[in-house]
Image (cartoon, rainbow, N blue to C red):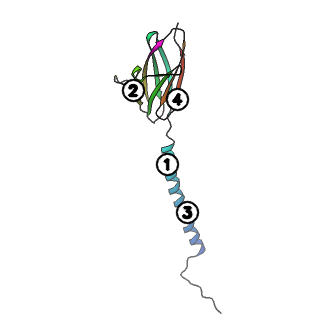
Amino acid sequence: MKLRRSRKALSPVIASIILIAVTVAVSIAVAAWMGALTFNFMATEQGQITFMQFTAGANGVITVTFNNTGTTKITLNTVYVNNVVIAPASWAAYVGGSTTASSPATVPGNTGAIINVTTTVTSGYQYDVKLISAKGNTFEYTGSAPS
């Protein structure tokens, strides 16, 4: 019995090259898709309180300098002073040097904000200020009111 060989078939070398090319193309497409997903989910808030200034008195003011060092906007929802929630009416944020106050405050990426917190400030006491974002991140700073 004689086996017939088809002369129109692909050689094993050509078939291997095509298989490798298809595999590489699919892996590049999957990597690009996963990279886009990771980039969207990995957008983290990066901010810090860099300075606090105090005005003593029963209606004192703690002036907080906050910088958004990331590229994602940060919405500041809640302010705590010494673990006590400050009512939204008692704090105002001035974002990017604008004169309009807003509470809650949205600080765009690479932008600073000044937050004025109206509370009782006693000279010589230490104050712990926490800013809580809409995503639940905490930005904290501790400072002492001058004597």
Picture disc at residue 23? 3
Picture disc at residue 138? 4
Q: Which residues lie in the magenta part?
A: 118-122
Furthest residue to the right?
1
Q: Amino acid at mark 4?
A: Thr
Tell me whether the residue at label 1 lies in contact with that at label 3, contact meaning CB atoms closer than 8 angstroms. no
Q: Name the residue at 54% across, 58% down.
A: 27
Kindly report the distance in space between the C-alpha atoms of the residues bearing marks 2 and 3: 53 Å
Tell me whether the residue at label 1 lies in contact with that at label 4, contact meaning CB atoms closer than 8 angstroms. no
Say which label, 2 or 4, has the lower sequence index. 2
Q: Name the residue at 47% across, 15% down.
A: 53
Residue 132, how many percent across, how many down?
49, 29
Residue 88, how many percent across, how many down?
41, 24
Q: Amino acid at mark 2?
A: Ser
Majority secondary structure in the magenta region: strand
* Element on which disc 4 rests: strand
Image quarter of the N terminus: bottom right
Kindly report the distance in space between the C-alpha atoms of the residues bearing marks 4 and 3: 45 Å
Q: Which residue is the site of mark 1?
A: 37
Say which label, 2 or 1, has the lower sequence index. 1
**In terms of image quadrants, where is residue 24?**
bottom right
35 in relation to 27, above or below: above
Kindly report the distance in space between the C-alpha atoms of the residues bearing marks 2 and 1: 32 Å
Q: Nearer the viewer, residue 118 or 66?
A: 118
Residue 108, how many percent across, how many down?
41, 32
Task: Tell me if mark 2 has few (under 14), some (14-19) or many (20+) residues whose alpha carbon lies within 10 angstroms of its own.
Answer: some
Say which label, 4 or 3, has the lower sequence index. 3
Say which label, 2 or 3, has the lower sequence index. 3
**In terms of image quadrants, where is residue 12?**
bottom right
